[in-house]
Amino acid sequence: MTIVGPGALGRALARGLAASGWRVGLVGRDADATAAAAAECSVEVAGHSGDLAAAVAGADPLLLTVPDDALATVIASLVPVGSWTGRCVLHCSGSRGADLLSELAAAGATTGSLHPIMSLPRVTGGAAEIPSATPFTYEGDPAALPLVTRMVDDLGGRLQRLGGGGKALYHLASCLAGNLATVLLGLSSELLEEVAIEDGAELLSPLATRSVSGAAATEPYAALTGPLARGDVDTLTAHVTALRSSRRLRLLRAYLDLQLLALDALRREGRAPERHDELDELLRRELATLTEECVDGGDGVDGSV
């Protein structure tokens, strides 16, 4: 197996698959960085992207783990490189569909898109590990499924097939649940700093983990707790006042929008809290006021969020 792109995902896949007995080679733009990554993962250096023909010669399967914006360029450079008949090429982008590999498919390759639903933060001095039971999604040629299933099994993951199209929404959902949840934890930590509480992320992480675990174990909105679910108008009013006082008006806008989305969802599912009409009026009134302030005075923010 050859992996083109020794970034966080490429290294994590290389490390995990090599540990399961796969012979893995890495290909990257920078020879020194690629060699270092290969050493970290206990795999081989397959070559340099400057000589892609030699680097991927006979590679089967070939995994592309380059950044999304570079993927089309890399694929275009692969098309004229040798014969693709009978070979398998997979890209690992969460936001791009398998159809991006259509030219290689037309040249005889079996193609698809394999993506782990997992964050892989950069690790100093090593490669991140793909946790056990990580979900992987696959979209593409069914002929690649036996190979893909074996790879995911060897990585200790769970495989979910995707239909054609819809990758942007799929990736958006992943970002909302992962990346933007991280942003919310960071913003929450900053608010705690304003009341002299340090290590806010560590303090809040058990709450965040328990909330997400509860939502995953049942219907997400059935697990919702807090002032909105209780119909506590006074507490939501206090939240709005606190955010205004700290001049975090962009965060206030996001807070109001999220609470309105949550309230709409609770109503849809027949779980409307007490005083839900008052909650709705409060949130919409504050959002309208905030919008007017931003129109009248620019962003309405003093540089903070």
Image (cartoon, grey):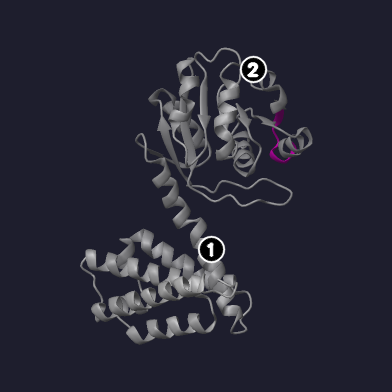
Give the residue drawn at x 53%, y 63%: 183
Residue 101 pos. (x, y %): 48, 26
* In-front residue for pair 222/289: 289
Residue 90 pos. (x, y %): 51, 29
Q: Is residue 41 magenta?
A: yes
* In-front residue for pair 122/169: 169
Disc 2, SS: loop
> Residue 142 sits in which quadrant?
top left
Evaluate whether residue 170 shows in this view.
yes
| Above or below for 217 versus 46 | below
Residue 298 pos. (x, y %): 51, 70
Residue found at the far right of this picture: 32
Give the residue drawn at x 77%, y 32%: 31
Give the residue drawn at x 38%, y 65%: 214
Say whether residue 287 is left or right of residue 127.
left
Location of the N terminus (image quadrant): top right
Give the residue drawn at x 61%, y 42%: 12
Say whether residue 295 is left or right of residue 128.
left
Residue type at the position of mark 2 = Ala
Please give the label number shown on residue 57: 2
Which residues fall within the magenta stretch? 39-46
Residue 291 pos. (x, y %): 41, 72
- Disc 2: CA contacts within 10 A as few (<14), some (14-19) or many (>=20): some
Q: Which residue is mark 1?
A: 183
Q: Is residue 261 magenta?
A: no
| Above or below for 149 versus 125 | above
> Residue 163 sits in which quadrant?
top left
Say whether residue 135 is left or right of residue 231.
right
